[in-house]
Amino acid sequence: MQHQRGCPETVGDLCDEPPLIEESGAAPDSQHGQLWNDWRWQMRNRIRTLQQLGARFKSLPVTQGMAAATAKFPLAITPYYASLIRTLDGSDPVFQMCVPQRQELYDPPCLKDDPLAEDEHMPVPGLVHRYPDRALLIATTTCSTYCRHCTRKRVAGQHESSIAGTRLGQITEYLSVHPEIKDVVISGGDPFTMATDAIEKVLAAVRSVSSVDIVRFGTRTPVVMPMRITDELVQMLRKYHPVYVNTHFNHPAELTPDAIDACRRLADAGIPVGNQTVLLRGVNDDAQVLEELFRNLVRHRVRPYYLFQCDLVHGVEHFRTPLSRGIEVMEYLRGRLSGLAIPTFVVDAPHGGGKIPVLPNYVVSSSPSHTVLRNYEGMMVAYPEPGDLTAFGAVREGETKGVWELLHGEGTRNPPRMASAARRRKAARASAMNAMQLDMPF
């Protein structure tokens, strides 16, 4: 087999079957009727070329930079996802995430083809075994829409095909002799671009390994092609419980009624749905935008799981934010959202280092007797450690001078000046005092 551009040997070896859905050059014509709601029609009518993009958006100027970016990284946009674009410029989050731009050509040396060293952790083609108890199965190299921030550009879209039976057999054999693997993530590309019976073959093969406890799917179809979440697909998935689905909403604009309905179908079938958001400059690096997204996801039974720092992959430098921005966002969300709606901010470390949580620093200092903690408002509190604390002196309530006093038991808290919670408590005390005075006889 001759490999196409950018498809590494270790992944390319699994790509020896033709695409399950043939492409068509037809342009999208209507958002009404059965055709629009048929996911196969959406796949056949993806925007794949700049000519098709220009035909869909007649006022969009096609530049040489866009052409160069398309030549380097594949282009595909479903008609449905294209319909979410409101303005043809960088102010539109959907436009930024799916339309090629010349900024993708900026290529500093820190960016890599395989920033997470997945190929180095691939004992058999198509299976990444990086963590002791988890493995990732690359079931296909096809996506319905190719995100411009994709971390797997070396694979996704370079050669659209799905895993062969021989490779699937090698993977199940490896899983069988490695019973420490309890959790298998089926990803790609996007596995839900495969036909339902093809997905079931992969799922059944993984489920045939008795030591595998849970199976997770990574898919963006609820976001970019929600009509793919059909009753047929959902009924098939529920036969293999426990099955989990992680999807990929990045912005509230993506949470349309169709997308919400797709998530509802999964949740109603007893399939827990999580979400993995990527922090993208100019798209969602606004704490209030993410607050709205996460609040709405939870409302529709989708659990915010991860907020990812953008990976160090080619073509994403214009999307990357400083780590301090992510920390700032997390600082904002804490105290404003339920913990159920707050994802873990992680850096998927280069060189295969794995996911590293990055949080604001809530531990101020520690001593044998106390640890000083800071809450989201800035209040410092002394948490007493277990043991005999009499040697550290009596605890005195009231204002303290600083961290040293809290560490040595000289007080239990150091509230920020008129923090909102302190204002509420002060107002409540004043209200209570007023009520008492009104009840007092003169």
Image (cartoon, rainbow, N blue to C red):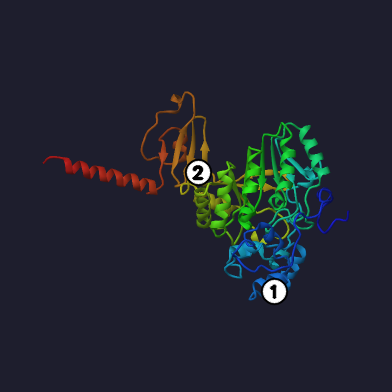
Local packing at callout 1 (Cα closer than 10 Å; few below 14, some 14-19, many 20+) is some
Q: Quadrant of the C terminus?
A: top left
Q: Which mark is residue 331?
A: none
What residue do we see at 73% from left, 51% from top?
Answer: 115
Instruction: Determine whether 397 is above or below 360 in the image.
Output: above
Task: Give the residue number, with chain letter if any, for mark 2.
Answer: 339
Image quadrant where residue 361 sits: top right
Q: Position of residue 199 (x, y in %)?
A: 72, 46
* Cα distance in 3D space between marks 2 and 1: 44 Å
Crowd rating for badge 2 (residues with CA inside 10 Å; few <14, some 14–19, many 20+): few
Element on which disc 2 rests: helix
Q: Tell me residue 351's x, y (percent).
A: 74, 46
Horizontal and vertical percent position of residue 262: 58, 52
Which of labels 2 and 1 is toward the front? 1
Residue 141 can be seen in this image = yes
Q: Nearer the viewer, residue 168 or 201?
A: 201
- Name the side, left or right, on which 177 lies relative to 362: right
Quadrant in which residue 70 is drawn: bottom right
Question: The disc labelled 1 sits on which kind of residue?
Answer: Val
Whichever of labels 2 and 1 marks the residue nearer the N terminus, that label is: 1
At 32% across and 45% down in the image, what residue appears?
Answer: 426
Query: Residue most toward the right?
Result: 1
Query: Which label belongs to residue 62?
Result: 1
| Left or right: 31, with 331 as reference point | right
| Circle 1: element type | loop
Rendering coords of residue 363 (x, y %): 52, 40
Is residue 321 visible in the rendered image? The answer is no
Q: Is residue 431 left or right of residue 175?
A: left
